[in-house]
Image (cartoon, rainbow, N blue to C red):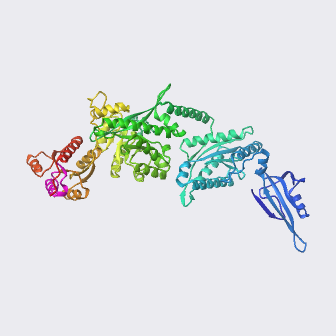
């Protein structure tokens, strides 16, 4: 309740212009004018709750009560009068509507929805008289539930209070909008409404929306934490007195939902066709919910292939919806609706459960029961607190090794709420899964920015791969991304590889893995099983890479690659890391000896012809050191020299390879040598 106090000579409170209607106490009813009231107090009348209707110069009507009495000195001289005004507009409105609910939101002090609708009704009456439209803004904060769960409910409430204060302030300043105080409302949660009167046109409504937008974005400090909020804002404008307030509010809310669907942090003017669009989305949302209940979803899998060994390194799970009448619906047509309706959360859980079931079946057919690496797409909307716990529980129930699971996230996850992304990604990493950044290059984030996040892999978007070899700019971008990504120790995968030429380019650029129709289209879990167990001969239209693929086998162990030629080291490193080895490189014999002590390799791939200490000498020294008793040594030579080969074996090298080597050869020779050495009985301790 607002109070105004004044010393005589008294008049109505600031903003109150002409008194209108009747003024009365509970017992007395009399017409009043400003002077009449003052005269009555000065003449000795004591006023108790004299009620008066007042209209401001801008046409806002308020109900006030005045109490007043004369001020007289001890000596009896008249000093003046004191009059206190109270604004009881809200109370009167409540009485008039017989409502028992509080007119004010207890948290923010803003109006409640009910009273707001009444304000809109009155404003519409005035709007038609003056032919000046009114605007209703529906405001919904972006990611408020995340914010609140991160900072705690008390901090969340402080944010709402601050937002309420800023909205009221927005109305106070009047550029293009002469709205009265108190025409902001909170409907509950983070849903706010704002009424702007005398909003001349669309441009003035946009100015008001922009003002709200700017006011909300300004930094605030909540419990010592600096933060800023954004919102989706919907705007509805009318001067039609016949318009029902509820309909106008609904229009603003419809526009707000569209603004939210577009990603929030924007305002949207209501347009008639939005209703139809939203309705069809509601229908689709309902159909999606039923699809989940009726089991209309399937998961298919697309192989990811190592570009150095041609082996399948894993698969990506891709969701499919088989609609009973409309047939197959592609994910890009229904995932946005699933995200918007929140259904992506139960759908995402179902995908993870299905993937775990399929992964169990594959591990049964893979040699040694080793799990196949599986990538699962995760939408921004799934980034809710509890995501890691949910996935961890699903994997634990199914007996899936989290280390075989990779979650693909998009840049939008990292850009929207970086703090939430960092926290959630670290939690996911802590349960043991790998994280891949999908569609890289489409979201404007730099690789340097990405180092803030615990990512393991970068997937270069198909749009760049498409231009490889034909579009110099795309080629240069892929080359630059590849170089930087490797420097930052990200594993790099190219998406949407369709041609042999693209594959050749990617190999030249040192890309680790590829995925695309050139290798294989997404297929069923059963087809993946047979792909893993059989080695069919190359079928027409299918790339030899996958049709001739070796079953996916992961190796573990440390390999030190020693060669003075950086390209040889690079090729060896990517071949060996692709199958799971932990690889270090050395460019000279001296460096090799130092690293052998520090890194403790299980295997050394050693060039014979090194500058300085030669490869053969390194081999001899390593063998002489009891610390390296179990070490596997594979010699690499530029030319097949029988004398050199004899020398290498006399120094107890395990294998001798001649350059150039194919990635597959290197991997299989390293694996075979390590296997043989493991079978050699350990020396008996003396
Ligand atoms: P994405 O994760 O980038 O998946 C790659 C998409 O490219 C897949 O489309 C795949 O079929 C397609 N693709 C692969 N190789 C080629 C190629 O050589 N040429 C062409 N033209 N396309 C290729 P799809 O299956 O239609 O999935 C589209 C998107 O839907 C996915 O993009 C992913 O963002 C999303 N998605 C799919 N499944 C799920 C899911 O289970 N959950 C979530 N949240 N999103 C999913
Ligand atoms: Mg993906
Ligand atoms: Mg992608």
**Could you tell whether 40 is left or right of 214 in the image?**
right
The image position of residue 546, as x and y in percent, is 30, 34
Q: Residue at x 64, y 47 (%)?
A: 188
**Could you tell whether 106 is left or right of 594 in the image?**
right
The image position of residue 611, as x and y in percent, is 17, 56
The image position of residue 462, as x and y in percent, is 39, 39
- Placement of the C terminus among the 4 image quadrants: bottom left
First to last magenta residue range: 607-635
Residue nearest the viewer, comparing 1 with 438 = 1
Q: Is residue 212 visible?
A: yes
Q: Is residue 535 above or below residue 262?
A: above
- Placement of the N terminus among the 4 image quadrants: bottom right
**Could you tell whether 600 is left or right of 5 in the image?**
left
Residue nearest the viewer, comparing 473 with 368 = 368
The image position of residue 555, as x and y in percent, is 27, 45
Ligand 2 resides in the quarter of the picture at top left
Corner quadrant of residue 67: bottom right
């Amino acid at each position: 309740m607002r109070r105004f106090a004044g010393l005589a000579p008294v008049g109505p409170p600031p903003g109150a212009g002409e008194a209108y209607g009747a003024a009365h106490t509970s017992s007395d009813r009399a017409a009043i004018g400003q002077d009449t009231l003052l005269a009555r107090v000065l003449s000795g009348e004591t006023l108790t709750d004299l009620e008066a209707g007042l209209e401001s110069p801008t046409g806002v009507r308020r109900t006030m009560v005045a109490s007043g009495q004369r001020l007289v000195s001890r000596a009896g001289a008249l000093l003046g009068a004191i009059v206190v005004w109270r604004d009881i507009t809200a109370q009167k409105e409540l009485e008039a509507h017989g409502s028992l609910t509080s007119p004010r939101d207890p948290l923010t002090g803003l109006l409640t929805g009910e009273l707001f609708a009444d304000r809109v009704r009155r404003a519409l009456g005035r709007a038609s008289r003056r032919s000046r439209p009114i605007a209703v803004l529906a405001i919904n904060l972006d990611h408020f539930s995340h914010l609140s769960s991160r900072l705690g409910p008390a901090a969340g409430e402080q944010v709402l209070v601050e937002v309420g204060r800023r909205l009221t302030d927005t109305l106070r300043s009047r550029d293009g909008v002469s709205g009265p105080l108190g025409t902001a409302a909170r409907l509950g949660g983070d849903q706010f409404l704002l009424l702007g009167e005398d909003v001349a046109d669309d441009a003035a409504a946009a100015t008001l929306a922009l003002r709200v937008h700017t006011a909300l974005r300004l930094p605030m400090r909540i419990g010592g934490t600096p933060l800023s909020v954004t919102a989706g804002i919907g705007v509805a404008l009318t001067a039609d007195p016949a318009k029902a307030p509820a309909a106008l509010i609904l229009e603003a809310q419809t526009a707000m939902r569209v603004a939210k669907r577009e990603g929030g942090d924007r305002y949207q003017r209501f347009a008639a066709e939005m209703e139809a669009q939203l309705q069809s989305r509601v229908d689709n949302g309902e159909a999606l919910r039923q699809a989940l209940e009726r089991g209309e979803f399937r998961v298919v899998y697309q192989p990811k292939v190592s570009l150095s060994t041609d082996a399948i390194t894993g698969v990506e799970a891709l969701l499919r919806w088989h609609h009973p009448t409309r047939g197959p619906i592609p994910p890009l047509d229904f995932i946005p609706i699933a995200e918007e309706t929140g259904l992506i959360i139960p759908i995402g859980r179902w995908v993870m459960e299905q993937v775990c079931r399929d992964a169990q079946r594959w591990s049964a057919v893979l040699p040694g029961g080793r799990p196949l690496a599986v990538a699962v797409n995760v939408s921004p909307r799934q980034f809710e607190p509890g995501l890691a716990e949910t996935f961890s529980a699903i994997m634990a129930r199914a007996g899936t090794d989290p280390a075989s699971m990779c979650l693909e996230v998009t840049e939008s996850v990292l850009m929207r709420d970086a703090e939430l992304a960092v926290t959630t990604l670290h939690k996911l990493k802590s349960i043991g899964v790998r994280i891949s950044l999908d569609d890289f290059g489409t979201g404007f984030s730099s690789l340097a920015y990405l180092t803030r996040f615990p990512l393991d892999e970068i997937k270069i978007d198909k749009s760049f791969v498409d231009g490889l070899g034909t579009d110099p700019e795309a080629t240069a971008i892929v080359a630059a991304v590849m170089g930087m990504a490797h420097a930052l120790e990200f594993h790099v995968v190219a998406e949407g590889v369709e041609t042999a030429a693209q594959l050749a380019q990617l190999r030249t650029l040192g890309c680790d893995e590829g995925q695309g129709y050139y290798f294989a289209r997404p297929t069923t879990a059963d087809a993946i099983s047979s792909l893993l167990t059989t080695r069919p001969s190359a079928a027409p239209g299918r790339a030899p890479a996958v049709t001739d693929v070796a079953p996916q086998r992961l190796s573990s162990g440390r390999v030190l690659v020693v060669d003075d030629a950086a390209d040889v080291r690079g090729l060896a490193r990517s071949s060996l890391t692709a199958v799971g080895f932990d690889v270090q490189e050395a460019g000279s014999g001296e460096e090799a000896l130092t690293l052998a002590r520090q890194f403790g390799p299980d295997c050394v791939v050693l060039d014979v012809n090194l500058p300085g200490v030669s490869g053969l000498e390194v081999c001899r020294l390593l063998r002489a050191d009891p610390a390296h008793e179990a070490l596997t040594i594979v010699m690499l030579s530029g030319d097949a020299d029988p004398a050199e080969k004899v020398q290498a074996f006399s120094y107890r090298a395990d294998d001798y390879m001649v350059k150039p080597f194919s990635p597959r050869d290197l991997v299989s020779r390293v694996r075979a040598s390590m296997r043989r050495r493991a079978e050699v009985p350990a020396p008996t301790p003396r």
